Image: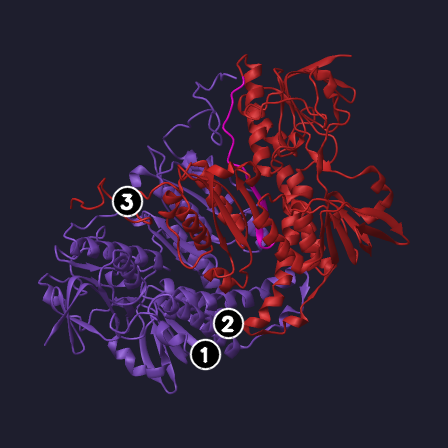
Chain colours: A purple, B red
């Protein structure tokens, strides 16, 4: 069979693959983009976008429960037309999928966009249908899919995942959400707010990947008031007539459907990674360098959710860029470059938002770390918003005063998380942060209060006579030239 | 008459005065706090807090106009009970006033808290009622009040200001808002959304102090769709039976009341500043150093809204701290210290928010400045929120790539403005900002898009092969050690 040669073969037309393609294109390299399955990114099709659209409707509908306190009458008369709401979510989703496709694969010539699955025959030789592609470098960006235990597949339509949920024209009256990580928590809360009878289950005792036990406790309290949570016990599921019976410890309920959100698995089946000649880990992944995305020492790169490292869009984009750039380097006879990765940032868009930023609580050197905190209850703006629930915890190195990380549940948490992650990436100290502008009345003042609390617990001394303001001229603090 | 001696006399028990008092107390100095008029800060009584409470109700009520698009039925049945809404605003206001008083003046011994007006007899001698206070240093923190042209006072109850608006048990059916700076725009939009028939007037052709003509145009378009704006012409007002007749150019209307929001004036009457022996400016203000808050070379300091420089709470707090600290210094025989002020940040909480950050557009060296922009219309998250209106403009030095300032109208603008002001204060370049985490889908991605646009217009070259990611090791970009 004849081999077709290209500089770079990219397997997967999601966020990472498309970013890798941009690099190939910019460098003037020949390439093919190979995509088995549905075109469109995970984000636009089944991830960020439809979930955020559903969250928005759910939040707006839920807000009716506040309106009476403000003198807005008639809020009891608000009713959700579920079919219309779902159609809206699907419309939004379609808009974003079309936008992605329109700016990427729609205009690709047929011979550059192969809509089929790829299989490694050698590290640089791929089988794609009847074709053989010989590439100077290969980028693996095949993404991930919901993890579903094999026996649960027997539940047929009663088993929902993010792949099927956003396709529904109507929703079941009751849903058990199994797995309360990012996806399960966001969707569980939204489904509950849309009027579905929801109960949440997780084998772990934590929500949304929170590691800080105080923040976790706060989150369980806030979310647990909205719908029942059953944590720390495995579930057993069986058919129960038209319904499913869910058991967790002594608790059991019957529901119309379950949302399976126990994680995602890398798309590796049939890819033939064993042909790379490298040892694969338990998940089937080869060793790779997260700064160069290079697989072993091969002219092969891996990027995006398939790595199972940072399954969020902006990181998938970065990994695609790095992999694409280094694929270009390799095919130009140069060594791959290693890049500094961004400060870790994970946002759960439940209400209030849950965010995990920088160094995880579980990886802190507790002897060397000071922790500041603020409960959202008394925060002025949060009170005004009628959403003063949650807790912010910030971590800093005791000696240097540098901010290391934070975990929080707060309204506008997504915005605070940016401020915090930018500060960590710039290696700011708590004092430096306290000298930045904090307007009034804003949610950022909650962060300010947490930082003030943290500052009191540091060993490092204040630089100058006022914590909040730096001296204009170097001074002993007792005199300043005019 | 006998003179009573204190180390520090503070005139005004608002945000600045209270912060100055904290410094005196911390240093163990004797002090008196002198306050004529209502106790409680401008912020809590008539400023930030009641206005934000009113904005929140107005926004929640306005949101009903979106609900139908999402399949939330019955939104036409929502009705505002104005009296209840106003009561809620007043409750919130009272809560915050009580909180301020409870943590400041409530527990002050009578002889330390003089509830009367002060008058300078000499730079360090004050008359307060029957008392004479001789002070080692004086802090002037008398605040400001709404500017009202003398002839308008004849309109009696039909003339509203922020001093009277939040006291009303009901609202007039129609209100002309005269002056569309920060206060007029926030309240005008809220009143309109609460169902009042509002028209806005300003002698200037700009809204909310915006200097960037493009952002101003965008704001006029967005706000002008909500209620009529009449800009660039002075108004003439006359009585019209039970109503007021407002004329601006060819336009005229009759309204039940007017909200006078044409600015605020420093509280200086009766203060006897002429006794300081310094030349006073047209507004009656003595010369002062904004880094030390010292008045001339006197042991007198000035802080907060009375300076008419940065009439926002966090700056008033800073000025109070500086003035208080330097009053302490002076009474200890030391020279006042000069402090670095925070990056200017002004937020208008209208919807979408209007923000002015860093160097004003009017003060940019246009030859040396590159401007990036993004319209909010196509921004993913803004679309999902159903609030994709506005424009972000960011300014950087062409040669160094450093961010200088920004003006914007955007949903969650208040949060973006923090990210931007922190970046400016840290002297970040556009490229450094682009290497920070931007999650998805968030409003911060709009800032990212504006920065990308700006980056393309800079003369400075990208540091490394990828704009978005820094090389881990110094490198020529072609090879990196492993």
Q: Position of residue A240 (x, y in %)?
A: 36, 84
The chain carrying label 2 is A
Q: Assess whether mark 3 and mark 2 are in contact (beta carbons under 8 angstroms).
A: no
Dot 1: what SS?
Answer: loop
Query: Is the residue at mark 2 from the same chain as the one at mark 3?
Result: no
Q: Secondary structure at mark 2?
A: loop
Residue B427 falls in image quadrant: top left
The residue labelled by disc 1 is A171
Q: Is residue B347 covered in magenta?
A: yes
Q: In the displayed structure, does residue A412 sit left or right of residue A68?
A: left
Report if residue A5 lies within the magenta region.
Answer: no
Chain letter of disc 3 in the image:
B
In this picture, is B119 found above or below A107?
A: above
The numbered mark at residue B464 is 3
Q: Is residue B350 visible?
A: no
Front tag of 2 and 3: 3
Residue occupying the point 67% across, 59% down: B226
Q: Which residues are magenta?
A: B336-353
Q: Would you call the spot at circle 1 few (<14 residues within 10 Å), some (14-19), or many (20 or more)? A: some
Dot 2 and dot 1 residues touching (CB under 8 Å): yes
Disc 2 with disc 1 on a shared chain: yes
Q: Is residue A400 visible?
A: yes
SS state under label 3: loop
Residue carrying label 2? A194
């Amino acid at each position: 069979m004849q081999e077709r040669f290209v500089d770079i073969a990219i397997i997967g037309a999601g966020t990472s693959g498309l970013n890798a393609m941009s690099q190939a294109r910019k460098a003037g390299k020949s390439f093919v983009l190979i995509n088995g399955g549905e075109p469109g990114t995970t984000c636009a099709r089944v991830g960020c976008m439809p979930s955020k659209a559903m969250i928005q409707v759910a939040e707006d509908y839920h807000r009716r429960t506040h309106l009476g306190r403000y003198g807005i009458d008639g809020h009891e008369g608000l009713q959700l037309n579920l079919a219309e709401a779902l159609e809206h979510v699907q419309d939004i989703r379609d808009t974003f999928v079309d936008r992605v496709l329109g700016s990427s694969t729609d205009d690709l010539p047929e011979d550059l966009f192969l809509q089929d699955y790829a299989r490694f025959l050698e590290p640089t030789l791929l089988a794609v249908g009847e074709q053989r592609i010989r590439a100077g470098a290969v980028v693996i960006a095949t993404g991930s899919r919901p993890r579903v235990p094999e026996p649960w597949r027997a539940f047929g339509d009663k088993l929902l995942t993010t792949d099927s949920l956003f396709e529904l024209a109507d929703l079941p009256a009751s849903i058990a959400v199994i797995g309360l990580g990012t996806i399960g928590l966001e969707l569980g809360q939204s489904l509950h707010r849309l009027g579905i009878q929801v109960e949440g289950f997780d084998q772990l005792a934590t929500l949304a990947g929170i590691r800080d036990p105080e923040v976790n406790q706060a989150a369980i309290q806030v979310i647990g008031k909205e719908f029942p949570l059953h944590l720390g016990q495995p579930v057993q599921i069986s058919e129960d007539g038209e319904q499913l019976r869910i058991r967790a410890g002594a608790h059991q309920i019957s529901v119309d459907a379950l949302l399976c959100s126990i994680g995602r698995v890398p798309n590796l089946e049939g890819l033939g990674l064993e042909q790379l000649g490298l040892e694969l880990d338990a998940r089937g992944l080869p060793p790779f360098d997260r700064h160069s995305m290079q697989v072993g020492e091969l002219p092969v790169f891996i990027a995006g959710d398939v790595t199972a490292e940072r399954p969020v869009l902006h990181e998938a984009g970065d990994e695609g860029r790095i992999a694409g750039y280094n694929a270009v380097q390799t095919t130009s006879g140069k060594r791959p470059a290693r890049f500094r990765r961004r400060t870790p940032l994970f946002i759960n868009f439940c209400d209030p938002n849950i965010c995990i930023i920088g160094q995880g609580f579980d990886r802190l050197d507790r002897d060397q770390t000071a922790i500041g905190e603020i409960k959202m209850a008394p925060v002025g703006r949060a009170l005004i918003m009628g959403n003063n629930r949650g807790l912010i915890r910030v971590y800093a190195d005791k000696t240097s005063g540098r901010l290391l990380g934070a975990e929080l549940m707060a309204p506008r948490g997504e915005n605070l998380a940016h401020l915090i992650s930018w500060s960590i990436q710039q290696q700011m100290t708590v004092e430096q942060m306290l000298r930045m502008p904090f307007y009034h009345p804003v949610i950022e003042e909650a962060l300010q209060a947490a930082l003030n609390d943290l500052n009191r617990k540091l060993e490092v001394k204040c630089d100058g006579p006022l914590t909040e303001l730096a001296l204009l001229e170097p001074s002993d603090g007792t005199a300043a030239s005019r």
